[in-house]
Every structure is written in structure tokens, then in C-alpha cells.
Amino acid sequence: MATRFSGFEFTRPHIIHSRIHAEERLPAQWEVIIGMGKLTNAVADTVLQTFEAFPTKYKPRPREDGSREWIALSGIVLSRVTCTHTLCSTGLKCLPQSKIHQAKGIVLHDWHAEVLAIRSFNKFLIQECHDLAVAGGRISNFVRRRDEQELSEKCFQPFTVREDTHIHMYCSEAPCGDASMELTMSEQEDATPWAVPTSSASLNGLASNRDVSNEPLHGRGYFSELGTVRRKPSRPDAFPTLSKSCSDKLALAQCTSLLLSPTTLLLSPKNAYLHTLILPESQFSRTACVRAFGPSGRMAPMTGREWSGGYSYRPFSIESVNREFAFSRRNGRVGQRMIPSNVSAVYTPYILQTLINGVLQGRKQFDPRGASEICRKGMWKAVVDVVGKLGLPGLEKAVMASSYEGFKEGQLLRGRRDVKADVKAEALKGWKRNEEDDFVLIPEDAKNQ
């Protein structure tokens, strides 16, 4: 099976392309593997093989000095009894806090692989909704139109992920932040804990039990501080960031679902939760993962919690596999210098793009022409396009806000904001909001034409 992307043919192994009213059988190897209880290996293999099929320009580059580039890979696999779908991304970096105000919805704030995979997942769902709206259809392989009796003031979304869909994620590296702290400690020549100020003393061995509202966010530093919200790690000489770690973002998604704010206006969050997180054995610390994500760790205050609008605390299962990504930082020769790659790749069945510094490769960082389809402005615009084809006045009013900040603060997204506020107040304490990236979708003078 092949799809055209910008003039070349790209083959996708083990991927069944979702089409309106088109049901295709799950590949035979998946049926056998699932029957043997080997789903985690199947998910990992599918993500790894999807990346392997990428053209060379989407992969880390060979270097003449003998060093080797490495990159983190994350993929999301949607599966039903009859079909499966794969989305994957690579990436390692994020935007410094000092440049957020320049992003204007065009530059991504965070292009770690896990974050790009989630954004790609949302872009895929928006496109599925678009195709249904254009065709006047009711159901695709993974999305369906909700019936009138399913809708209410709190559950207003016209679409939902189909109920029998399972969502799995494979990551080639442990998510940065709390889920990787034991691995970080094991890599230190001197694993002696750093001295922590008296005011930062942990309670009951878990830093999240104390008041951390006035404490700075750490990256890799103070690695013996466990259960805390952390920012993205970076070199000591790098400009600081306030982008939260992938561990923290995944932990929050156990309550908000994998849907982003724009997508939440189209699809109910109820069926959009991650079921399984899969890591290589070398990157899996059960202690760290249970603490970072599980109901007996820092998320304990969320156990059993449900909110209106289809939200609830849905902890995912965490599994390991003996699969390693060909471009992981562990796949170099002994003594070979490993260099983080600055090229990211984003793949959905509808797009295949390379990014550098949060924008399309070949464009300057703040050039509007460098906007990826998964950037904030691109996602907002895509949702506006779908809503325009649905002809629903309530949604049209919600998406046509005067600014992105106004869009996110709209009444229809209040339920999502309430969930986030509860989680940050009770479980992910110390979460500091990044500087807001506010922008307009359409210039004011264009609105009045």
C-alpha cells in the first residue's frame, strides 16, 4: 500500500488507511499476535517499521566525523478488531520561554517525540471529522457521528472515537521527567543526591506531597526529588524553558484524554484515552512509571475521579518490549560520540513533514510560511474548517473567537479547564503555566470585508 507525499511514493507497512465506510481486515500477523497475548510487541514493531519506511531525509543524518545522530521516536497505534492505524513522530527539543511570545501559533512550543505524536493523533482525528462532514457520512474506521440523544449541554461534541477503539503508544526513550529519574540516576558517575533547600524537604518520600507552588521547576537537576512536576531537560548553557516534561503531560492526559483543546470541540473525550504505554526494556523502570502515572503514585488523589463531559482518571497500563529503535542513543558503537539530531519528522496518513526548530525544514523559525499543519494556528484553523461544514451555530460561535486565548477560554471548554485545574491542584502540584502564545486566526480587517 502506498500514498503520494510531495512527489514521492511512501510505503506504509502494516497500515490500513481509514476511509469513510471502508472496513478492512486487520493484518494476519496482528490477529495471531493478539491471540498470543503479544500486543505490545505488535505495537512496537508497527511503529518501528513505519519509521523504517520513511525516506532518508526524515531520518537522522550520517556524519563525516564518525559521530552518530540519535533521535527519540514515539508512535500512536489505534486498533479495532477489523483495522489498525499508525501515527509516529520524532523529536527532542522545545522552544525557550523567552521566545514563546514570538511563536504566534506558528512555531511549536514543544517538539519532543511524545508531544508530536499526540498532536499528530489530534490532527488525524480532525481530518477524519472533516471527511465525514464533507461526505455527509456517519462513521469511519475510528470516528463516528454521535446521535442526537447522546448530546447535552456538557456533552456537546458532534463526533466521538468509536467505542471499541484501543489506543496504544510506543516510545523509544523513557518520557522525560519523573518516569525517567531512576534512569537518570543510574547514568551518573556520582549518584549522590544534590543538596535540596530545607524548604524543599519531601514528605513521605514523595515531593508532590508538599507545597511546591513557589519552587522553580527542575529539568534533570535534583534527580533524587521524585514525584515532582519538571520542565523539559536541557543543556546547562541552554536558554530555560517552562515546557513541562513528557511524564507530566502524559500524566495529565490520563484525566483530560489525548485530545487537545481545539479537538475537544469536535470529539467527546470519553473514548480518547491512552490504553497502553510501551517502552523498551532498557528504558523501563517500573518504580518510576508507577510513581509518575499510577494510582498508587503521585496521581493517587485522582483515583476514582470522574467529571462531567466524559472526563475521568483513566490510568494506562505500562509494558516493556525487547525492541530497540535503530536511531536510539544506545545504538552507537562503543566509544562513538552520539549527537542529538535537530530534525524532527511528523507522520499521519495525511501528512509527512520534517521540522527544525518547531517549523517546516527550510523555513526561518518565525516565518509564517514555516507553519506545520500540527501547530496551534494550523489545528485551530482545521477545526474552524470542520465546524463551518457542519453548520452548528453553537460551535461556530465557540471557534470564531477574536484570539486564541479567547478561544481556549470559551464556555464550551470550561469542563476541560476544570479537569486540568483539579489535577494540577491535587496531583501535579507546582505546575507553572508557560507564557501565553496569543494570536489571531484572521486579521481583523479581513473579518470586516
Image: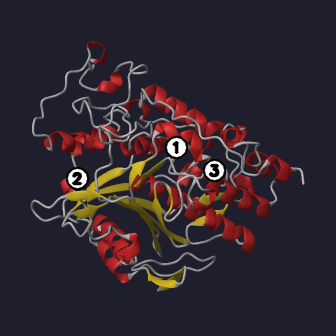
The numbered dot on residue 230 is: none
Asked whether 384 or 255 is in front, the reply is 384
Q: Earlier in the sequence, mark 1 or mark 3?
A: 1
Q: Earlier in the sequence, mark 3 or mark 2?
A: 3
The amino acid type of the residue labelled 3 equals Pro
Image position, residue 283 (x, y; %): 22, 53
Q: Earlier in the sequence, mark 1 or mark 2?
A: 1
Image position, residue 57 (x, y; %): 40, 73
Judging by the rendered image, the residue that carries numbered circle 2 is: 283
Tell me the crowding category of disc 3: few under 14, some 14 to 19, or many 20 or more residues within 10 angstroms, Cα based: many
User: Looking at this rendering, what residue extends furthest in the top direction?
Assistant: 198
Image position, residue 436 (x, y; %): 58, 36
Q: Please give the name of the residue rendered at 20% of the width and 21% of the height, measured from the top-left corner.
A: 195
Tell me the crowding category of disc 1: few under 14, some 14 to 19, or many 20 or more residues within 10 angstroms, Cα based: many
Q: Is residue 131 left or right of residue 96?
A: right
Q: Is residue 52 left or right of residue 156?
A: left
Residue 425 visible in image: yes
Distance Cα–Cα, label 3 vs label 2: 32 Å
Tell me the crowding category of disc 2: few under 14, some 14 to 19, or many 20 or more residues within 10 angstroms, Cα based: many
The numbered dot on residue 256 is: 1
The amino acid type of the residue labelled 1 equals Thr
Marks 1 and 2: CB-CB under 8 Å? Answer: no
Under circle 3, the secondary element is helix
Quadrant assignment, res 132: bottom right
Under circle 2, the secondary element is helix
Q: Is residue 96 left or right of residue 283?
A: right
Is residue 78 placed above or below 407 in the rendered structure?
Answer: below
* Rendered image coloring scheme: secondary structure
Judging by the rendered image, the residue that carries numbered circle 3 is: 262
